[in-house]
Image (cartoon, rainbow, N blue to C red):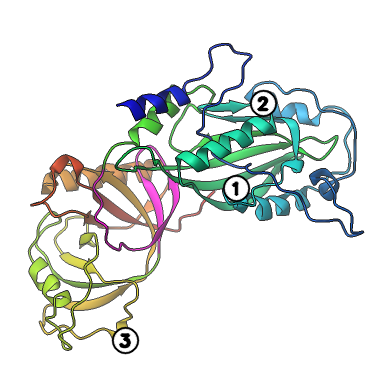
Amino acid sequence: MATAAHLAHRFLPPSPPHRRSTSFLSTAASKAPRHLPASSNGSRSSGLQALSSKSSTKWPLLGVRASLVEQQEQGSSTNVDMNRMVQFLYEDLPHLFDDQGIDRTAYDELVKFRDPITKHDSIDGYLLNIALLKVLFKPDFKLHWVKQTGPYEITTRWTMVMTFMLLPWKPELVFTGTSVMGVNPKNGKFCSHVDYWDSIENNEYFSVEGLIDVFKQLRYYKTPDLETPKYEILKRTANYEVRKYAPYVVVETNGDKLSGSRGFNNVAGFIFGKNSKQEKIAMTTPVFTQTTDTEASNVSIQIVLPSDKEMSSLPVPTEEAVALRKVQGGIAAVTKFSGKATEDVVREKAQILRSSLVKDGLVPKAGCSFARYNDPGRTWSFTMRNEVLIWLEDFALD
């Protein structure tokens, strides 16, 4: 389709190697210009002046990825306050996509930006890239942490969720990863910025794997316009997402199997008025079936209640087998798929997810949950949004 072809054209690298790319997908840290606040003596300083001593020496152009940080340590250096630069990024990067934008004076004019499918060799090129992102997507950037990882190197970890506005179904693209930012020791400005995505192995520019990862996320999943449990995406790999769920309340009863629907009418009856107050409660999505053991011998079916409902204010179920329970939330690994979710398919997805987690050094809890977002009688199977969730022990976002 025309829009997809236009997207592909944007992502492809430029033909002559000396020309700068204008492709618009990049993830990490720099956007609309702004200035650092005035210094203590009342004068307006450059980003450099606020972070280190002045220098008029221009930093030479840097080479490819491996040499970006190494070359920053060559030559004489000023007294760069790296702790202050870390704090500066904590304050500056959350403005990545808002009207204020980042402070361009904290970057060398010929700063090197790289991600798997985009490169720019100046702050102007990167800011143009950000302007395009804001038009074509609705970017939501979340900074998780910033830390010093070398004498003149700072690493950030982030999540970026973008809605591609040009396609009718407005797919959501999720990227998580780290950015390694080199500091020019001669002037205290950022002179290199390299992104690494969690979802691919080959993060070198230009990565075909990275481009494929982008296009895979353009597929259509039908998600009803209903409230869902609130969560934050911490990490997205090639095989699963790691989400941090806020607490939520469910109405539940006994089920028969993960892919089954026994008990649904009972829990649905509660929100349709079969309760002590005969109160009707808004429907949400997804419907969960959950087991807490590896054999799926003990299954419950659950409907999540709206977030404005508290346990203390909810009516009491009139059916003895139906109960209310507050789920404390936590960290869960999630794999998404479409198609008809038979019991064999759900169990296979759960086993693959569990194996991936163990391989990646994570500790999955026993059991799993199956989330159904769609009415199977009214939704084409290839557009369905199905998910398998496994809760994790002691997850740390490194």
Residue 247 lies left or right of residue 385; in this view the side is right
315 is higher (above) or lower (below) than 238: below
- Label 3 with label 1: CB-CB less than 8 Å: no
Q: Which residue in the structure is indicated by mark 1?
A: 96
Q: Nearer the viewer, residue 102 or 364?
A: 102
Tag on residue 312?
A: 3
Looking at numbered disc 2 in the image, what kind of residue is underneath it? Asp
Packing grade of label 1 (10 A; few <14, some 14-19, many >=20) is many
Reply yes or no: does residue 310 show up in magenta: no
Residue 182 x, y percent position in the rendering? 71, 36
Residue 244 lies left or right of residue 250; in this view the side is right
Packing grade of label 3 (10 A; few <14, some 14-19, many >=20) is few
Q: Which residue in the structure is indicated by mark 2?
A: 121
Looking at numbered disc 1 in the image, what kind of residue is underneath it? Leu
Which residue is painted at 75% across and 49% down in the image?
A: 35
Residue 18 x, y percent position in the rendering? 64, 14
- Label 3 with label 2: CB-CB less than 8 Å: no
Q: CA distance from mark 3 to mark 2?
A: 58 Å
Which residue is painted at 17% across and 55% down in the image?
A: 295
Which comes before the other along the chain, label 3 or label 1? Answer: 1
Looking at numbered disc 3 in the image, what kind of residue is underneath it? Ser
Packing grade of label 2 (10 A; few <14, some 14-19, many >=20) is many
Reply yes or no: does residue 240 show up in magenta: yes
Residue 49 x, y percent position in the rendering? 86, 46
The range drawn in magenta is 221-245
Q: CA distance from mark 2 to mark 1?
A: 19 Å
Residue 25 x, y percent position in the rendering? 50, 33
Residue 125 lies left or right of residue 2; in this view the side is right
Q: Could you tell me which secondary element the residue under label 2 belongs to?
A: loop
Q: To which quarter of the image does residue 264 belong?
A: bottom left
265 is higher (above) or lower (below) than 43: below
